[in-house]
Image (cartoon, rainbow, N blue to C red):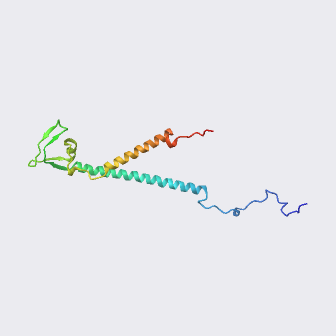
Amino acid sequence: MPKESKYEEVSPGTHKPNESDEPELKWYQKQSGWICMGCTCVLIVIMIIIWIIVSINDYIEGTNEAREIIDLRNTTITEHVIDFENQNEYINCTPLQSCRFQCSYIKLNLHKHPDECKYDDWMDIWEVILKILGVILLIHCICACFQCGIYSKKGNST
């Protein structure tokens, strides 16, 4: 017969562990810690995106204001030109009798681009880059909506 042990009288439900039996989890080991870190990362990404959008908007507004100042600038023409917007009217400008026009009028009506009226910025290049990124984003959204490309669900054939 087996030897009796002193633990035979203890029933399985009588032991209640103290809170101090298990070590307390650290903040990064708890699920709430990971949720907090994830929310913080998402918030930082959103703030960076907002900062980029605000910076682009400020650049565009500043550049447009600088372009308006250039368009209002007066400049002289010392050559014969044709006004294409007024029934091809011939304007007789000479070095002796130069003509003064605003840059916007010269660009729109005379189809000339004197050095004083040229824009000194990168707006055209940024516009092309933003349009390309917009098209890529649109294609990405369409593919995500219609589940094409990498978003397509592949059925398991068994």
Q: Quadrant of residue 134?
A: top left
Up the image or down, 41 lies above or below 84; here it is below
Q: Is residue 19 left or right of residue 61?
A: right
Q: Residue furthest right?
A: 1
Q: Residue at x 13, y 46 (%)?
A: 79
> Who's the residue at 38% across and 45% down the image?
132
**Relative side of 97 to 12, left or right:** left
Frontmost residue, 131 versus 156: 156
Residue sitting at 58 percent across and 57 percent down?
33
Q: Is residue 23 left or right of residue 131?
A: right
Residue 106 in the image, given as x and y percentages of width and height: 19, 45
Q: The N terminus lies in which quarter of the figure?
A: bottom right
Q: Nearer the viewer, residue 80 or 51?
A: 80
- Residue placed furthest toward the top: 87
Report the number of numbered marks: 0
In this image, 79 relative to 53: left or right? left
Query: Going by the picture, which residue comes out furthest to the left?
Result: 96
| Residue 135 or residue 22, whichever sits in front | 135
Q: Which percent across, then down, holds residue 92?
A: 11, 43
The quadrant of the rendering that contains the C terminus is top right
Seen at 45% across and 54% down, the residue is: 47
Residue 30: image location, x then y, percent: 61, 57
> Which is more toward the observer, 11 or 136?
136
> Could you say where residue 124 lies in the image, as x and y percent from the top left?
31, 48
